[in-house]
Amino acid sequence: MRPLIESTRSPEAPPLALEEAHVWHIETDVSDVMADRMRARLAAPERARAERIRHAGARRGFVVARASLRALLGHYLATTAELELQLSPYGKPQLAQAHAGRLHFSVAHSGNLAMLAFGYADLGVDIERIRPVSRVGQIIGRVFSASARSVLETVPADDLWPAFFAAWTQREALVKAVGGGMFATVDPLDFVWPSPGRPRHFVEPLEAGESRTWTVAHLDAPAPFAAALVVAAPIQRVLRFSLGAE
């Protein structure tokens, strides 16, 4: 069965099934009153980190994304207790203490948009504003796999930046899924352009005749953004939800 993407606008999250991933699209341009309420929901280290962010929009985006993350984690884990988060060696937030490993999640934000992804396997989500990039040829040669390079080298000029950021968000989502660094993480995935409308499964051969199945989904995002989800499992359905600014 081919995996599906289904979208809805809802203030509530349904239960998360084993072969699903949930992606929340959140507008971070909230009112000052709402921003203050959401800041109060953060743990002390998160509030301190927010205060160190000088750009007001970026600071507000961090607060809204982290407060929304905590609310949704509480829903999926069926708890009202304050959840402890810790950073991996590469800076990826993850659950700690009693809830460690019970749920996987990923956070991304760009401009006034944030995306939060949840599932029961390692996953990563990324969103980026589509824009011209200097020295793009050097970046393509250094960052992307041979598959992505071969595609990007042949796309029409009008497709260069949408295709580049489709490849970039897929690459960044993979890096987040495995918890590595952009230049140290080996990329086993292929890259397809134009981006398929459905998630696709990619089988990675491993040693001793074994394999691992990945799910790659390029997510619809408002112009001029690109977004992607990568899951280290054969996900059958990606459910998408959105919350507006208050």
Image (cartoon, grey):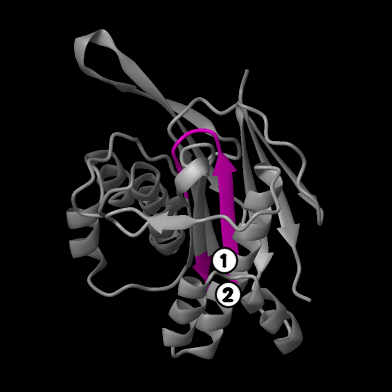
- Residue plotted at (74% across, 80% down): 34
Taking depth in this image into account, of 107 and 141 the one nearest to the observer is 107
Q: Position of residue 65 (x, y in %)?
A: 58, 67
Q: Nearer the viewer, residue 224 or 216?
A: 216
* Position of residue 201 in the picture relative to residue 237 (left or right): left
* Disc 2 from disc 1: Cα separation: 5 Å
What element does badge 2 sit on? Answer: helix
Is 73 rendered above or below residue 178? Answer: below
* Secondary structure under the numbered disc 1 in the rendered image: helix
Quadrant of image for the C terminus: bottom right
- Viewer-proximal residue, 246 or 33? 33
Please tell me how crowded label 1 is: few (under 14), some (14-19), or many (20+) other residues with Cα within 10 Å. many
Position of 1 with respect to 228 (left or right) is: right
On screen, 162 above or below 167? below
The image shows residue 20 at horizontal and vertical percentages of 63, 32
The residue located at (82%, 54%) in the rendering is: 10
Picture coordinates of residue 53, whole percent (x, y)? 44, 84
Indicate the amino acid at tag 1.
Arg
**Marks 2,1: beta carbons within 8 A:** yes
Disc 2 marks a residue whose amino acid type is Val
Q: Verify whether residue 118 appears in magenta.
A: yes
Placement of the N terminus among the 4 image quadrants = top right
Q: Mark 1 — residue? A: 66
- For residue 63, the mark is 2
Is 51 left or right of 132, judged from the image as shown? right
Provide the residue span drawn in magenta: 109-124
User: Residue at horizontal 77%, vertical 41%?
Assistant: 14
Whether residue 111 is visible, yes or no, is no
Q: Is-magenta flag for residue 8?
A: no
